[in-house]
Amino acid sequence: MTFFIKLLGTGISLLAGYAGTKVVDAAWERVTGRKPPKGDKDDVPTTLRTALTFALVSASVSAIIQVLANRGTQRAITRFAKTQDIV
């Protein structure tokens, strides 16, 4: 069952990462009025400062999501182990 919980935690982490990316992109567009720098061919040339700021914000949100997902998975594994001991 622990494997299933870890697999579920990985799926939740992936979905949360995708949602976090969309939130950061929308917030960036709302605050700056421009599309986020992604390095696409259609991308408007951006300054180094803009690209670094976006990378910093995006990486921070990604790290927070990863920590929260890992903590949630560990909490679920611990809770499952305690219920196994009771039964």
Image (cartoon, rainbow, N blue to C red):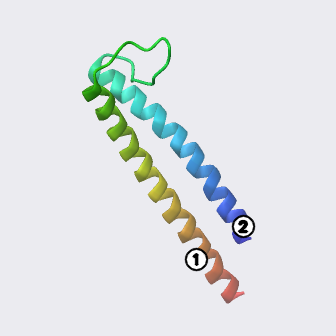
Residue at point 47% right, 31% down?
Answer: 22
- Apparent side of residue 8 relative to residue 51 in the rendered image (left or right): right
Q: Position of residue 70 (x, y in %)?
A: 52, 62
Query: Is residue 81 or residue 14 the one in the foreground?
Result: 14
Q: Position of residue 80 (x, y in %)?
A: 64, 75
Question: Which disc number belongs to residue 78?
Answer: 1
Residue at point 43% right, 33% down?
Answer: 23
Query: Is residue 55 or residue 83 the one in the foreground?
Result: 55
In which quadrant is the N terminus drawn? bottom right
In which quadrant is the C terminus drawn? bottom right
Q: CA distance from mark 1 to mark 2?
A: 13 Å
Q: Are marks 1 and 2 in contact (CB under 8 Å)?
A: no
When asked about the image quadrant of residue 35, the answer is: top left
> Residue furthest toward the left?
49
Q: Is residue 73 above or below residue 53?
A: below
Q: Is residue 81 above or below residue 40?
A: below
As shown in the figure, which amino acid type bears the numbered disc 1? Thr
Q: Bin the neighbour count of mark 1 within 10 Å (Cα to Cα): few under 14, some 14-19, many 20 and up.
A: few
Q: Position of residue 73 (x, y in %)?
A: 57, 64
Question: Which disc number belongs to residue 3?
Answer: 2
The local secondary structure at tag 1 comes to helix
Q: Nearer the viewer, mark 1 or mark 2?
A: 2
The local secondary structure at tag 2 comes to helix
Q: Position of residue 69 (x, y in %)?
A: 51, 57
> Residue furthest toward the front?
48
Residue at point 49% right, 65% down?
Answer: 71
